[in-house]
Every structure is written in structure tokens, then in C-alpha cells.
Image: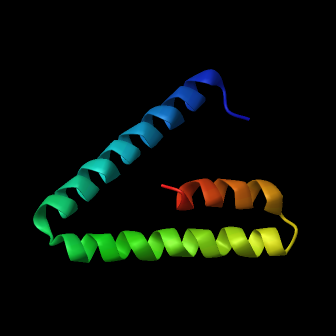
Amino acid sequence: MLNSKQFEDDQRRNTERRRAMIKQWAEYVRTHDDSDWSHQQNRLINSQLQSANEMAGAGETDPVRFGAARDRLDDR
């Protein structure tokens, strides 16, 4: 079990890593054509939706709640 100092250190490192990834992604978006990075985002989102659908189909999540959330996104 982590003590509070270890926990705080882990949180700090995680925050630093997230910020570095955000900066790296922002740089990529600035330096690459929109069609390049939007295609990658589309693949990522589609794979997440596929995984969520598979989980719902396997009973690992509530399909009604998942469907309602998905439908809200479709309405945008």
C-alpha cells in the first residue's frame, strides 16, 4: 500500500505525463494536415465504441445506459 508521499509522487508523475502527452498531441495537430489527425481520431473513437458495444453485448455493462449515452452523442 502506498503511503501519502508515494501517492502524491505518483499523482505528480501522472500529471506530468498527461501534460507532456497533451503538448505532444497539440504539436502533432499543429504540424500535420487535418485529414491525417482526424482520421486517427476517428479510428480511436470507433474502436472505443466497438469495445463498448462488445461489453454491452457480453453483459459487462448496462446496455440501456450505454445506448442512451451513445444516442446523446448522435444527436449532436
| 46 in relation to 10, above or below | below
Q: Residue at x 11, y 65 (%)?
A: 31
Q: Is residue 15 visible?
A: yes
Quadrant of the image occupied by residue 70: bottom right
The front one of 45 and 14 is 45
Residue 9 point in image, percent of width and height: 49, 31
**Residue found farthest to the left:** 31
Residue 6 is left or right of residue 3, and the answer is left
Residue 42 point in image, percent of width and height: 41, 73
Residue 44 point in image, percent of width and height: 46, 71
The front one of 75 and 64 is 75
Q: Quadrant of the N terminus?
A: top right
**Residue found farthest to the front:** 75
Residue 62 point in image, percent of width and height: 83, 58
| 33 in relation to 64, above or below | below
| 17 in relation to 28, above or below | above
